[in-house]
Image: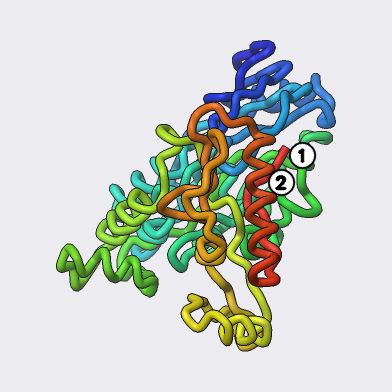
Amino acid sequence: MQVSYNTSLKNYNSFGIDVKAQKFIEATSIEDLEGVLRKTYSSELFILGGGSNMLLTQDLQKTVLHVAIEGKEIVSETEDEVIIKAMAGENWHKFVLWTLEQGYGGLENLSLIPGNVGTAPIQNIGAYGVELKDVFVSCEAMNVQTLQRSIFSLEDCDFGYRNSVFKKSLKGEVIITGVSFRLTKKDHNLHTGYGAIQTALAEKNIKNPGIKDISDAVISIRQQKLPDPAEIGNSGSFFKNPIVTKTKFEAIQKEFPEIPSYQINTTEVKIPAGWLIEQTGLKGYRKGDAGVHKNQALVLVNYGMATGKEILRLAHKVQKEVLKKFGISLEAEVNIY
């Protein structure tokens, strides 16, 4: 366990926002976690995982607890599948690559998503037709007040679109310490329905893709569309893709026939937020060091010295323009502090 004071969080959030933590503790074991929680009231703690899904707008006058518990193990396996448990501090993309190296399928579409394993269930991360809940078995979490350790099943987590019980009734109440996944060893259920994946595979003349091929395709797509946080500060998709009623969608479609969409069910349609933002003319927009990325309008970026408040003002501008043009309220996917 490491402790420091008046610590910059610039290297602990993917936006690269330079705010300070009054006190910073890095917990590398369950015992570390218990020790900190026994001595510090939960109201005085700010829990930090991979720092990939947050926008920090001010210095934190709290103790920042960085969950950096690493490790992974095979819990059980059969001839067809395997259950893998990964600890919260494992880097998500490195974990995905490790599963692929072992020949395990299920996470390939979720390649190159920033962040750590422990924060993945909170957001129910998803990409290219796959969500975390599709391979989720359970997660272990510790109550920040009672220190009780509990196991949450798929049903317990109440997963929704970029949502879970950990963002609702249990927000700030528990810390996820480990996550278990059910992955396939053969007869993998491949998800190649998204056009971008089909195009990437076709360009390489791959007609019968394996899990590694799909992962490579997803990585290539993301690298072309999304900036690397190590080079340009960002948190990936800043806004959720809005889901509207079929009636509302059809009304918008009359004015914008080219609008892309994904039907959720018989009454709801999902519209790509990036397309909506692009139609407002804000793609590539920049004010100071806060900007809308030139290749993907869904991504807000920090070109170097932008403050969290400047990024937030830009987000509000984007929301205002989309609401004005389409009558759709964009909801932030990132957590704002």
**Where is residue 174 shown, x and y percent of the image?**
74, 41
Residue under numbered circle 1:
143
Q: As displayed, is residue 304 above or below residue 180?
A: above
**83 or 176, which lies in front?**
176
Q: How far apart are marks 2 and 1 (CA)?
A: 8 Å
Count of numbered tags: 2
Query: Is any part of residue 85 visible from this angle?
Result: yes
Q: Which residue is drawn at 69% across and 50% down?
A: 316
* Secondary element at image label 1: strand
Do the residues under discs 2 and 1 have CB atoms within 8 angstroms? yes
Q: In which quarter of the image is residue 9?
A: top right
- The disc, 2 or 1, on the residue closer to the chain's N-terminal end is 1
Query: Which residue is label 2 attached to?
Result: 150
Residue at the location (42% across, 33% down)? 230
Q: Mark 2 belongs to which amino acid?
A: Ser
Percent of width and height locating residue 148: 77, 38
Residue 82 located left or right of residue 292: left
Please tell me whether mark 2 or mark 1 is closer to you in this view: 1
Q: Residues within 10 Å of mark 2 (few under 14, many from 20)?
A: few
Work out whether 206 lies above or below 337: below
